[in-house]
Amino acid sequence: MTPALEFHAVSKIFRARGKTVHALRNVSFEVSEGEVFGFVGPNGAGKSTTIKVMLDAINDYEGEVKLYGVSARTASARKGVAYVPESPALYEQFTALEILHMALDMYDIRRPDRDAWCMQWLERFSVAHNARRRVRELSKGNVQRVALAHALVVSPRLLVLDEPLSGLDPVGRKDVVDILSEYKREGGAIFFTSHVLHDVERIADRFGFIHQGELLTTRSPRDLVSERADRFIVRYQASAALDGAHAAIRDGEYEQELDEHALPAFLTRLQAAGGRLMTVKPAVSLETVFFKILEGEQTAPASGPR
């Protein structure tokens, strides 16, 4: 099966005012059909450059990028690709419904049920009641919903999202996660970036960690669990911390990391002390791995330009 997205040894260098910046350093990865690939990294790591390369907004790079087996430098490769930036630049003078009509026109999609089809997508993103309001009149969260509906109304094969849950309230985040999950089940591929690591962990099948232009690792949720499957974080309430507890999360609330063998005895001690168990969760998460990788990079000995 041909991958939806392929990066092969991609490097990009920016030069300005006598300075050289290695935006991407020999980056290679693939995203399969029906896969959600999360791209994580600090500001300036190379996430936006990666998206610009795959969409041919930047084309003076080394290496090869393919969309469904076709070079990303070929306009036809992007026929089945939809993109939503972090801050969507929709035409403010048009209504939400007109924005979706425009998407169908851009992709040369002719449907006899054009209005009903567009309204269906606005309804799915809970903005159908704003269908005939101009974009300039909508809140940031509703503009984000319209932009996502604008992307999906064309039935793309690959969805590229930059911070897709930015600006959404908790209800909106859940709605979007549910829609993206359905899109994936129907065979669509998703490449997305996010600073909210919990969202990446919840949505993605695999994660890519990029730092200073270098893709340090790619992992799956199963990989994370297997790394330290016998370690847990216990959060509890008590009048005082039990031995070994971390600093208090807040007054009367503590957390502690334990292995699976020590957990039963700890819970017995907690009950005897009159404490109350709040949560028990795996010690390894995307967030812990992310900061561990960054810490390793920052403490590694300098070896000159990479």
Image: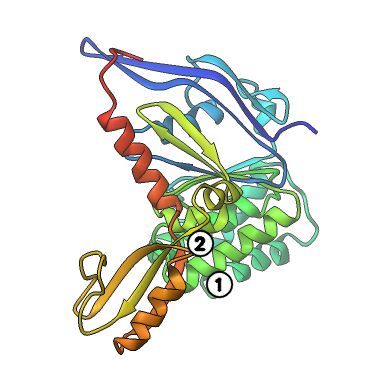
CB of mark 2 within 8 Å of CB of mark 1? yes
Observer able to see residue 285? yes
Give the residue drawn at x 39%, y 40%. Answer: 41
Give the residue drawn at x 27%, y 73%. Answer: 254
Vertically, is 296 above or below 75? below
Q: Tag 2: residue type?
A: Arg
Vertically, is 120 above or below 237? above
> Who is closer to the viewer here, 268 or 105?
268
Q: x%, y% of residue 141? A: 42, 64
Q: x%, y% of residue 63? A: 55, 15
Drawn side of residue 259 relative to residue 2, left or right: left
Q: Secondary structure at mark 2?
A: helix
Q: Tag 1: residue type?
A: Ser
> Who is closer to the viewer here, 180 or 32?
32
Decide which of tag 2 and tag 1 comes sooner along the chain: 1
Outermost top residue: 18
Mark 1 nearby-residue class (10 Å; few <14, some 14–19, many ≥20): some
Q: Secondary structure at mark 1?
A: loop
> Who is closer to the viewer here, 198 or 5?
198
Mark 2 nearby-residue class (10 Å; few <14, some 14–19, many ≥20): many
Vertically, is 115 above or below 128? above
Q: x%, y% of residue 67? A: 67, 30
Residue wearing tag 2: 145
Residue wearing tag 1: 126
Specify the label residue 9 is tagged with.
none
Observer able to see residue 131? no
Give the residue drawn at x 36%, y 15%. Answer: 306
Q: x%, y% of residue 238? A: 26, 83
Give the residue drawn at x 51%, y 54%. Answer: 201
